[in-house]
Amino acid sequence: MSWRTDGHTLTPDEIAASCEEAAALIEGHWTKGAWVDDEPEDGLAYCMEGALAAVLGFDPTLLSIKPTERLLLQSCPAYRAVQKTIEQRMTATFAAWNDESEWPSGESIAGWNDDYAENEQQVVDVLHETAKRVLGVPADQMRSRP
């Protein structure tokens, strides 16, 4: 699928598939601080936003030099679905910390990946959770791992 060139509204099945494909790209190949890292010996490594970009038909290496590409990516329904999952998780996290701060609506996925994600599994879990949420899986069955 290439949302980049098609630009059509994605169905929940397509959003879920995009999230699962991005999770598969990240597993064993996650990075922070870059959309894509071509230095690892075992191939490319992706941040969450870079992996989504790749599966949606974007070239993740262009996101920093072509701002219009990133804006287009951020308008994609799959991107917005992942963003919503992150917002829900961070709101719950702030509440658990008794912090009255609010997660900024519209915060980039790359910002969460670089500043808040603690490990690869957490990033992959957000993608799996997003796939389940858009397909209507009940909230109590969302998280793949405790």
Image (cartoon, rainbow, N blue to C red):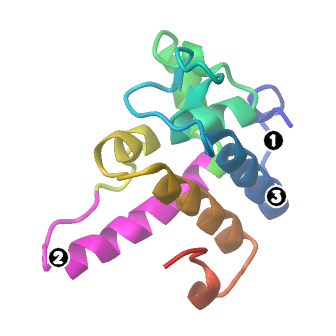
Q: Which mark is residue 79?
A: none
Residue 110 appears anywhere in the view: yes
Q: What residue appears at the point 32 percent right and 71 percent down from the top-left corner?
A: 91
Residue 48, compared with residue 139, is above or below; it is above
Instruction: Give the residue type that dot 3 points to.
Output: Thr
**Callout 2 secondary element:** loop
Q: Which residue is rendered at x = 57% and y = 90% of the image?
A: 140
Q: Amino acid at mark 2?
A: Trp
| Callout 2 touching callout 3 (CB < 8 Å) | no
Q: Which residue in the protein does label 3 denote? A: 11
Q: Is residue 89 magenta?
A: yes
Q: Is residue 71 magenta?
A: no
Residue in front for this viewpoint, 63 or 27: 27
Discs 2/3, front: 2
* Disc nearer the start of the sequence (2/1): 1
Secondary-structure class at tag 1:
loop
- Whole-percent x, y for residue 37 in the image: 52, 20
Q: Amino acid at mark 1?
A: His
Q: Which residue is mark 1?
A: 8
Q: Is residue 83 visible?
A: no
Q: Position of residue 40 (x, y in %)?
A: 55, 20
Q: Residue beneath label 2, please?
A: 97
- Gap between marks 2 and 1 measured at Cα: 39 Å
Q: Which residues are magenta?
A: 79-103
CA distance separating discs 2 and 3: 35 Å
